[in-house]
Amino acid sequence: MSQRKGRQYTQTTLEVESHAATAEKSEGAKASGAAGLTEEGPISLGSLQIEGLGKEIRDEISSLRETTKADMKTIRDELTEKVERLFSLQAEAANIQTSMEQSLSDTSDRLTALENSCQSLAADHKKLQEKCVDLENRSRRQNIRTLNIPEGSENNTPTAFVAKFLPKVLGEENFDGPILNDRAHRNLAPKPRNGERPRPIIARLHYYSDKEKIMSLSRSKGKLSFEGAQVHIFTDMSPEVGRQRAAFNQVKAKLRDAGIQYRMLFPAKLEITADGSKMSFTDPRAVERFIDSNKSS
């Protein structure tokens, strides 16, 4: 019995000592912790600073993330607005382009119609011009044009002067009576000064047969003279036909030099007689080629 009591006492004593040692260690750890010491070693101040710096970095990153989100939203809103505006402008440009294409198509159709109309009008104009030239020349069929008669020879009575002039230069024996002419006058150009070429006299004969006879005599006699001056008698024609005939002047001179016979046909056609055959030309260049071919042969 006493032995059991001794064992209990011993166990109780050991537990008390153990609790005391544990408490002592706890107090020592607290004190050591307060003094910055642990069983593993001292706590570094740099670790505390790094931890604080990390917290600041995390806070700054969070702030930058929020700022970036706000900036991105602002940029997105601006881009959305500009893209919508671009879409609007593109749609407007597409509408304008469609309208312009339609306008160009309409203009092209109108231009084609105008070109066709212009061609038709040009053809009609050419016909009317040719008809007017023909009518003008028909109205002059009984007219003769006399060149190189000195100014003042008609003594202000050109009609009576022409009636006496023609038999005098062509031969009175060729006419049965006086030549009847309806009217005569000088060309309407300004009166020339002394030494200048006199204006031609234009006379309208009453009978076309008299005009044909006068032209035939003029060609057969060749040179005609009046008061010491050489005069020429031609058929009166419109200025347009005169310009067309004047284009043959150079080739006519070449034909005369080459001894080739020719004559002018109305309105402006040159007929050449060579080697017993007759050829007609309306282009002076074709006559020059004909003359050159004859020279080479």
Image (cartoon, rainbow, N blue to C red):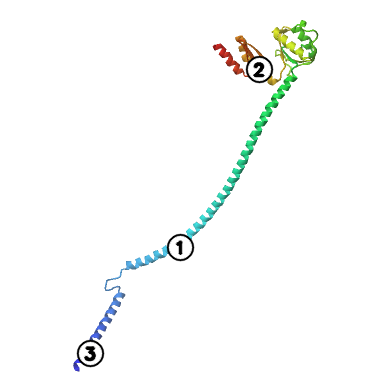
Mark 3 residue element: helix
Q: CA distance from mark 3 to mark 1?
A: 70 Å
Q: Which residue is mark 3?
A: 8
Q: CA distance from mark 1 to mark 2?
A: 101 Å
Q: Which residue is mark 1?
A: 66
Give the foreground label among 3 and 1.
3
Mark 2 residue element: strand
Res 113 quadrant in image: top right
Image location (x, y in percent) of residue 111? 63, 37
Amino acid on which disc 2 is placed: Lys
Residue extending farthest to the front is 276
Quadrant (top left, top right, bottom left, bottom right) of the N terminus: bottom left
Q: Of residues 194 and 169, which is closer to you in this image?
A: 169
Is 214 drawn above or below residue 114 in the view shown? above
Of pointers 1 and 2, the one earlier in the residue sequence = 1
Q: Is residue 278 left or right of residue 63?
A: right
3 and 1 marks in contact (CB < 8 Å): no
Res 296 quadrant in image: top right
Within 10 Å of disc 1 (Cα), the crowding (few <14, some 14-19, many 20+) is few
Q: CA distance from mark 3 to mark 2?
A: 167 Å
Q: Which residue is mark 2?
A: 269
Of pointers 3 and 2, the one earlier in the residue sequence = 3
Res 56 quadrant in image: bottom left
Q: Residue at x 76, y 13 (%)?
A: 209
